[in-house]
Image (tube, helix red, strand yellow):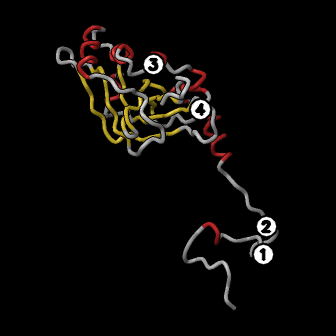
Amino acid sequence: MRQVDGSVEAVVSIQVTGMEGAPWEGHRAVGLLAAEDTVLVPDSPEDLVDTGQWFEVLVIPTSGRPDAPVERLGIAGIEAIRRVDDGRVTTAVLKLTRWSRYPSMIAPFDGDELKRQVREYSGDVWQALAAVGAISPELREIPEEVLRSVPELEARWRSWHIRFHSYQLPGDDDWSICPFISWPCHPYSSK
């Protein structure tokens, strides 16, 4: 998900559902797209696996391009990794209900080296991923101004994708839904 210059194209926020108007208040954790349908949440909060709450994944573009929309993706399932001694959830892997249009944020790395780094950093998966070169360290935080920009980004994207077709009176030559639907519409009669 890095651009050619090495900057980040998008960030991932794990959100409480229903916070569309205030995503900065719904933000619970930072995630990483590991694949188009998988998000890794290092240092996962305990409430992410609370069956009384539900969450969604918010992929927020940082590029400002009009063809780069904010994505709200549902969570189909969670694989939680927890410590044996205290039962604390340390990392979660989220399977998404549909694919993201954005690619993985994690560069290839050596799994054995990651395990060594996780031990070296006392279980800090963020630091371990950065140490093996899999992620940029700045991915660990999402600035609040990025979260506050989400409602405007979503509204702007929607406005860029609405086209208007004008007509004087219903049924005149400029009024037709036929170009937008297929069968059973016949745009021209054979009278």
| Neighbours of disc 2 within 10 Å: few (<14), some (14-19), many (20+) | few
CA–CA distance in space, label 1 to label 4:
41 Å
**Marks 4 & 2, CB-CB < 8 Å contact:** no
Foreground residue, 190 or 74? 190
Q: Is residue 6 left or right of residue 34?
A: right
Which residue type carries mark 2? Tyr
- Residue 39 occupies quadrant: top left
Circle 1 sits on which residue? 172
Mark 1 and mark 2 residues within 8 Å of each other at the beta carbon? yes
The residue labelled by disc 4 is 150
Query: What is the secondary structure assignment of the residue under circle 1?
Result: loop
Q: Amino acid at mark 4?
A: Val
User: In terms of image quadrants, where is residue 23?
Assistant: top right
Q: Which mark is residue 167?
A: 2
- The quarter of the picture where the C terminus appears is bottom right
Mark 1 and mark 3 in contact (Cβ < 8 Å)? no
Q: CA distance from mark 1 to mark 2?
A: 7 Å
**3D distance between C-alphas at marks 3 and 1:** 58 Å
Instruction: Identify the amino acid type marked 3.
Output: Ser
Q: Count the labels in the image.
A: 4
Q: Which badge, 1 or 2, comes first in the chain's sequence?
A: 2
Crowding around mark 4 (Cα neighbors within 10 Å: few <14, some 14 to 19, many 20+) is many
Please identify, in this view, whether the residue under mark 3 or under mark 1 is nearer the observer: 3
| CA distance separating discs 3 and 4 | 22 Å
Residue at coordinates 33% horizontally, 13% vertically from top-left?
124
Q: Amino acid at mark 1?
A: Asp
What residue is disc 3 on?
Answer: 136
Of labels 1 and 4, earlier in sequence is: 4
* Tag nearer the camera, 3 or 2: 3
Q: Are marks 1 and 4 in contact (CB under 8 Å)?
A: no
Alpha-carbon neighbours of circle 3 within 10 Å: few (<14), some, or many (≥20)?
some
**Disc marking residue 185:** none
